[in-house]
Amino acid sequence: MPFRPRLLLPLLSASFATAADWPEFRGPDKQGYSAAAGLPTDWNTNFNKNILWKAALPGIGWSSPVVVGDKIYLTTAVPVGGEEKPVVDRSLRALCVSATDGKVIWDKEIFTQAAATAPNIHKKNSHASPTALYENDRLFVHFGHQGTACLNAADGSTVWSTREFAYKPVHGAGGSPVIEGDLLIFNADAESNPAVIALDKTTGKQRWKFERVSDAKRKFSFSTPLVIEVNGKRQLITPGSGVVNALDPATGAEIWKVRYDQGYSVVPRPVYAHGMVFVATGYDKPTVIAIRAAGSGDVTDTHVAWKLEKYAPHNPSMVVVGDELYLVADNGILSCLDAKTGTAHYQERCTGPISASILAADGKLYLQDEKGLSVVVKPGKTYTVLAKNDLAERSLASYGVVGDDLLIRTEQHLWRVGMK
């Protein structure tokens, strides 16, 4: 498939990610927003419309694509012996793919996972679901309870790796890590004794550990933390079962918390705008809560600005555009809320069942459902669908952005979609 010369991305002259890159889960702002312009609205596999390339990927993984310069990074789990089945040894791997043509540049095994000791995963999970993270020519890959590693992004060689922080998960791993200063931080919300763990990003050694305490009977969750700044001070927002904690990211000391009783299996990454943190509280009945982030101690009764119980997401992360908060329930109903008050402007059927997070870019909202259908929506208080496009392949990963194009990971492929 021919590639457009204007899309060739310049090699980075420095080792750090630029503002145009997509270096971690939900992009450079960590909240699902891209400043890219000229993104495609329509694409079609039958007529090859705006499909720049389609690349087969080894194994299965639901980590989202990470982009730096002309390279794309992903993780995957490849069955040993080549046959995909529920009980099989797996090779947990990191991949570097060319953004120019989708060809694999390097493919490295990071860990081996023995079937005899590997916990079962949920049917909508994979053995490689956490998204990689890039910083300063280093690629951090995380397989939850199976281990964490730091790689040289140029060739995939291992700088350090650790399996010291194993825990007993339920349904596998899901949450991705975040970098703050010299720390790599991730949630380890296990079946019991849930925690948040900070490693020295240069060595992989533990720097601090926060023991999460809540009233939830089911302790497991899968969320990705978010670092924000409130009144000049950094806060690590980390949702878990029954509680969301705001921690001092340097030390792990708690700043504030909000309790939400028995909510468990929390997946969506929080978002922050208008001085409030927006959190979804997980199963069995999710609620979106808006929390004023300037408190201290237990602020459950004092700092919750509003709640939404109808059509809150179990899995997809939300996005804020201007004064509106957009969220999609797992059944495909998209809601547009006044972010400051929680008032619903609309709640409309948009997609089929969906797990991927919403992307806001180029004056549009992009949603990708589990059957491979994308729906492009115009932001605003009135529900307006701009386009629908079907890749007809199972899809659970969230979007990536490369240049002025979209990256979409499906069960067997990675797609680059852009204006031809």
Image (cartoon, helix red, strand yellow):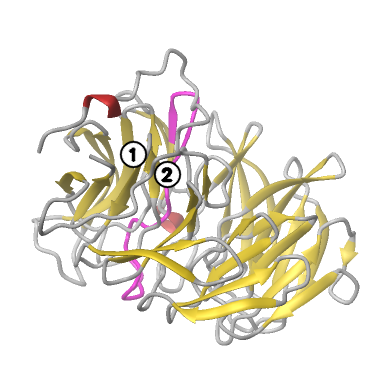
Give the position of the C terminus as an image quadrant.
top left
Question: Residue 185, how many percent across, how many down?
Answer: 60, 46
Span of residues in magenta: 118-139
Question: Residue 48, how many percent across, how many down?
Answer: 13, 51
Rendered view: 119 above or below 29: below
The image quarter in which residue 200 lies: top right
Rendered view: 327 above or below 14: below
Question: Residue 251, how many percent across, how many down?
Answer: 76, 43
Which residue is tagged 2? 132
Dot 1 or dot 2, earlier in sequence = 1
Question: Residue 59, how many percent across, how many down?
Answer: 19, 55
Q: Is residue 391 magenta?
A: no
Q: Tag on residue 73?
A: 1
Rendered view: 273 above or below 24: below
Q: Are marks 1 and 2 in contact (CB under 8 Å)?
A: yes
Taken as a whole, is the magenta stretch helix, strand or loop? Answer: loop
